[in-house]
Image (spheres, helix red, strand yellow):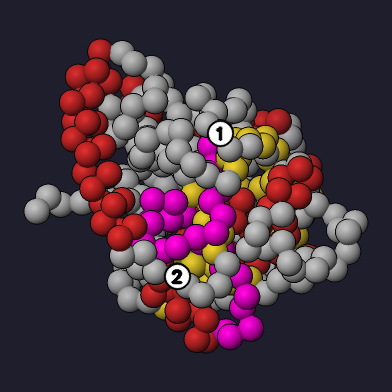
Amino acid sequence: MPTAPSTSSPSLPSSGLRALWRRRGVGAWLLWPLSKLYGALQDWNAQRMLQNQQSAGLPVIVVGNVIAGGAGKTPVTQAVVAHLLARGWQPGIISRGYGRKSRDCREARADSCASEVGDEPALLARSTGVPVFVAAQRIEAARALRAAYPQVDVIVSDDGLQHLALARDVELCVFNDEGVGNGFLLPAGPLREKWPRPVTASLYAGQPPSPPGSAPAFALQRQLADTAVNGKGEKIALSCFAGQRVEAVAAVARPESFFAMLAQQGIAPAATQALPDHYDFESFSRRLDNGQPLICTEKDAIKLWNSHPEAWAVPLQLQLPQAFWDLLDAQPALANRPRICDNDPQPMAGADYH
């Protein structure tokens, strides 16, 4: 029997591979036969999971993507959770816990070590305040979550669009500004599965995905927060770093996006380090001396603060149009929940920089 392809998080692409995936050049066409094989295996695996699909017994919202590497799923998860809380729901989050050393099903807490639960689940536990469980099999995480927190009445899955073994009521597909690239499946292109495919809605930074698919598409806006915080709990206005000699580090899928956002705020780091996504920071060393401010992403701070509590983490804020929230609230699994206030402010959430 053939081995199923990974449906959770393929190896994150290098900058060279990402460049190859932007167009249908010679390199992409040379890899195209392998993408056909990948597609066949992916289809087989999807059918196998659908045949054994299990329900969590609660409404499930899956936030995922169809491209390899980061697309900005976690900030959308944060925003969705904030919205659900504002509407009176009691949400919980499940995740695979990519990059963790453990293999069991466990709870991610605000003080959990990222190496044991994954950096994104640790960030979600800290930033949302709702229960978070991780497991390779999402149904296992969902059941453990419900057993530990019976008051939870809706589950948000951070990633898992291709994990069809878990039944879902809402699917949100997130795209970064590279869209679907050349439209080829892995490894000739960035697609983890064929696009377009049915989803509840797609969310995009930059231009809408092309082809767009039949689902409604909504633009998302990202911006740096006005305030940075360090591992000692101290806060400072981000504007204070403008004109200073600072160092910036980012270990996310697209670190250049973080550096560009800093530049938009008038912050021109004297030194930058772009590290691999989910980097553990165990061998991290600074390029400037410790007397210079060190700026990082909120996700990186989860691990960086262990050795550099002086690092200033800058959350990324995400905003979505009201039409998207109206669509989400109108979904059958969510429509019967009474709103607390019809004029709730639109939630904004700290985020990563995929």
Q: Which residues are magenta?
A: 149-176
Say whether disc 1 or disc 2 marks the residue closer to the N-terminus: 2
Q: Position of residue 175 (x, y in %)?
A: 53, 37
Furthest residue toward top: 26
Determine if the magenta segment contains residue 207.
Answer: no
Count of numbered labels shown in the rendering: 2
As helix, strand or loop, the secondary structure at mark 1 comes to: loop
Q: Residues within 10 Å of mark 2 (few under 14, many from 20)?
A: some
Q: Is 208 or 98 nearer to us in this picture? A: 208
Quick check: 53 above or below 145?
above
- The part of the image, by quadrant, that contains residue 127 is bottom right
Q: Is 309 or 131 nearer to us in this picture? A: 131
In the rendered view, does 208 fall on the left or right side of 158? right
Q: What residue type is disc 2 on? A: Ser
Q: Residue at x 50, y 60 (%)?
A: 168
Name the main secondary structure of what is drawn in magenta. Answer: loop
Report the disc number at residue 184.
Answer: none
In the rendered view, does 351 fall on the left or right side of 319? left
Q: What residue type is disc 1 on? A: Ser
Residue highlighted by disc 2: 55
Report the disc number at residue 214.
Answer: 1
Q: Position of residue 47 (x, y in %)?
A: 29, 52
